[in-house]
């Protein structure tokens, strides 16, 4: 396994420990929850008595978050061993191609969610020059989408960790 | 068995203090939304337990089981952070007072710590 690695520095031993992997999955859930509640906080605040302005969270603000969450669902429900399935003969024709297409769709949804939240921030809150309690609606939307993206990255990395770990065990 | 009668008594004390804090935080300020924290922390360990029953972690040749376990851990992490984020959200939106937020967070963490340590102490003997 060490003969065909790509980089000159070897991977540290502790990266493959199952405890770190478990911690990664918990952290992913925590990050997703943090992002989700940033957005729920903003939409609750916009309807509460503390909101002095007449700007409210509409369905437009929800679209980027929905896209990000859908993208995360798509990315993490792919079986990751199928991404390199073309080198084996027992897999059907074009399994890796299909998996990569679905993965691309997922990444596009997630990047579209983040970009859409920035677009909502700029078009709805920065261009009309709202002051800070209202501007926070847009900023929290961007933060929420970024946290969902980060959560997806952590989940992806820790699940790939698990593949290496089981590979070591199986040999 | 190391976890004997004293452990049970200590855990029940901590659990009672946690419930006391949460109930005081709702009753003193006449806003019963903080009771949601108790519900969150009571259902927080449930996904882990259910998904651990659904999949056998010992056969590492079958990769379908670990996805179910991972989903349970993800949901547990989600619910634990939700128990902290929910009072902060309610306080930020003016639905509960800030002291009520602090009391319900501390009480909720005590309740969740009790549930987790109860599981840690008494899960061992069910394995074999």
Image: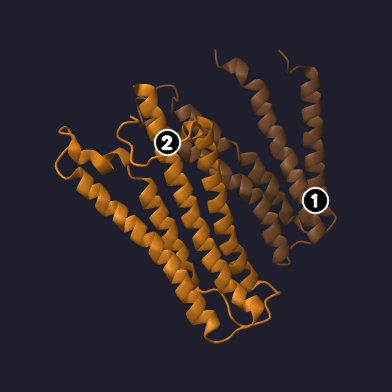
Of A6 and A98, the residue lying toward us: A6
**Chain for disc number 2:** A
Residue that mark 1 sits on = B103
Drawn side of residue B29 relative to residue A79, left or right: right
Q: Is residue A171 above or below residue A98?
A: above
Quadrant showing the C terminus of chain A: top left
- Reading the image, the residue beneath label 2 is A10
Q: Secondary structure at mark 1?
A: helix
Q: Colour of chain A?
A: orange
Residue at 75% across, 39% down? B110
For the residue pair B88 and A75, the one nearer the viewer reads as A75
- Check the image and name the residue furthest to the right: B28
How many C-alpha atoms fall within 10 Å of the one at disc 2: few (<14), some, or many (≥20)?
A: few
Q: Chain of mark 1?
A: B
Depth check, mark 1 against mark 2: the one in front is 2
Q: Residue at x 80, y 56 (%)?
A: B100
Q: Secondary structure at mark 2?
A: loop
> Residue A117's x, y, as percent?
47, 70
Q: Residue furthest bottom?
A: A128
Say few, some or many: other residues with alpha carbon within 10 Å of mark 1 (under 14 / 14 to 19 / 20 or more): many
At 55% from the left edge and 51% from the top edge, which residue is drawn? A31
As drawn, the label of residue B93 is none
Q: Is residue A140 visible?
A: yes
| Residue appearing at x 46%, y 40% in the figure | A158
Q: Colour of chain B?
A: brown
Can the viewer see residue B30 in this picture?
no
What x and y, as percent, mark residue B47? 53, 37
From the viewer's perspective, tell me whether residue A86 is left or right of residue A17.
left
Depth check, front residue: B29 or B80:
B80
The residues bearing labels 1 and 2 have C-alpha atoms spaced at a distance of: 48 Å
**Tag 1 and tag 2 share a subunit:** no
């Amino acid at each position: 396994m060490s003969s065909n690695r790509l980089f000159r520095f070897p991977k540290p031993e502790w990266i493959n420990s199952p405890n770190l992997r478990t911690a990664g999955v918990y952290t992913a859930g925590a990050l997703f929850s943090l992002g989700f509640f940033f957005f729920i906080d903003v939409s609750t605040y916009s309807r509460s008595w503390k909101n002095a302005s007449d700007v409210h969270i509409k369905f437009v603000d929800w679209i980027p978050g929905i896209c990000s969450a859908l993208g995360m669902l798509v990315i993490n429900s792919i079986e990751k061993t199928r991404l390199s399935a073309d080198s084996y003969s027992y897999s059907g024709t074009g399994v890796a191609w299909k998996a990569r297409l679905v993965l691309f769709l997922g990444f596009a949804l997630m990047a579209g969610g983040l970009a859409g939240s920035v677009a909502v921030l700029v078009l709805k809150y920065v261009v009309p020059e709202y002051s800070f309690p209202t501007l926070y609606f847009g900023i929290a939307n961007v933060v929420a989408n970024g946290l969902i993206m980060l959560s997806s990255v952590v989940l992806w990395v820790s699940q790939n960790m698990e593949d290496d770990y089981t590979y070591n065990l199986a040999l | 068995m190391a976890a004997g009668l004293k452990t049970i008594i200590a855990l029940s004390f901590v659990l009672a203090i946690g419930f006391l804090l949460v109930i005081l935080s709702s009753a003193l300020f006449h806003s019963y939304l903080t009771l949601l924290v108790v519900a969150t922390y009571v259902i927080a360990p449930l996904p882990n337990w259910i998904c651990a029953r659904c999949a056998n972690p010992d056969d590492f040749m079958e990769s379908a089981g670990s996805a179910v376990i991972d989903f349970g851990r993800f949901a547990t992490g989600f619910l634990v952070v939700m128990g902290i984020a929910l009072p902060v959200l309610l306080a930020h939106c003016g639905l509960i007072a800030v002291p009520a937020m602090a009391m319900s967070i501390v009480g909720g963490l005590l309740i969740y710590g009790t549930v987790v340590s109860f599981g840690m102490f008494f899960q061992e003997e069910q394995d074999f």
